[in-house]
Amino acid sequence: MSQGVNVASIYVRDQDEAVDFYVAKLGFKVHTDVRNGDYRWLTVQHPDQPSFQLGLSKPQAPMVDAAAVQALNELVAKGAMAPLVLAVDDCRVAYERLHAAGVEFTQEPVERYGAVDASFRDPSGNGWKMIEGR
């Protein structure tokens, strides 16, 4: 039997806005987009990682109550959630491409710990660390 993590999710304030960011700017592709009433199961996938999906989840009932929805949206917007990591071949080249596409960087590429990394945020406030693979 094979087991492993298939989907990890982040909270986003607007799923359409998130799709535009992750697909048009970061180069991911939509894997699954299905609706059941107000609920929408939406996942994207990096083209080089076909076995892993990133869920773009909107905090909503019945998973959480109205107070938790507000609190989660505020925490994400403040960048309080743990950052995700995007591995790239060349951090400086990726930075230039993403910056030109309108990605909001919070840190330009910096060399440290034997690698080059930069930081950016998605439109909801989720933090990303972009690290050059060696």
Image: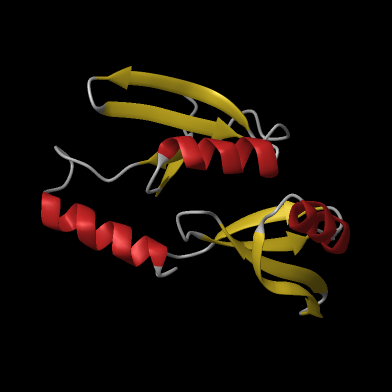
**Quarter in which the C terminus is drawn:** bottom right
Quarter of the image for residue 74 reads: bottom left
Q: Quadrant of residue 33?
A: top left
Left or right: 134, with 8 as reference point: right
Across and down, in percent, residue 125 comes to: 47, 61
> Does residue 57 sit above or below 111 in this rendering?
above
Q: Place residue 30 in its image quadrant.
A: top right
Drawn side of residue 22 relative to residue 18, left or right: right
Image position of 40 with respect to 85: above or below: above
Q: How is the image coloured?
A: secondary structure
- Can the viewer see residue 62 in this picture? yes
Along the line of sight, the residue nearer the viewer: 9 or 124:
124
At a point 73% along the width and 63% down the height, the residue shown is: 131
Residue pictured at 14% horizontal, 37% vertical = 62
In the shown orientation, is residue 120 left or right of residue 63? right
**Considering depth in this image, is 20 or 63 the residue closer to the camera?**
20
Whole-percent x and y of residue 43?
A: 48, 31
Q: Where does residue 113 sit, x and y in percent of width and height?
A: 76, 79
Which residue shows up at 48% across the image and 59% down it?
A: 126
x and y, in percent, of residue 129 in the image: 63, 64
Please give the name of the residue rendered at 86% of the width and 63% of the height, measured from the top-left corner: 92
Q: Do we see residue 54 in this rendering?
A: no
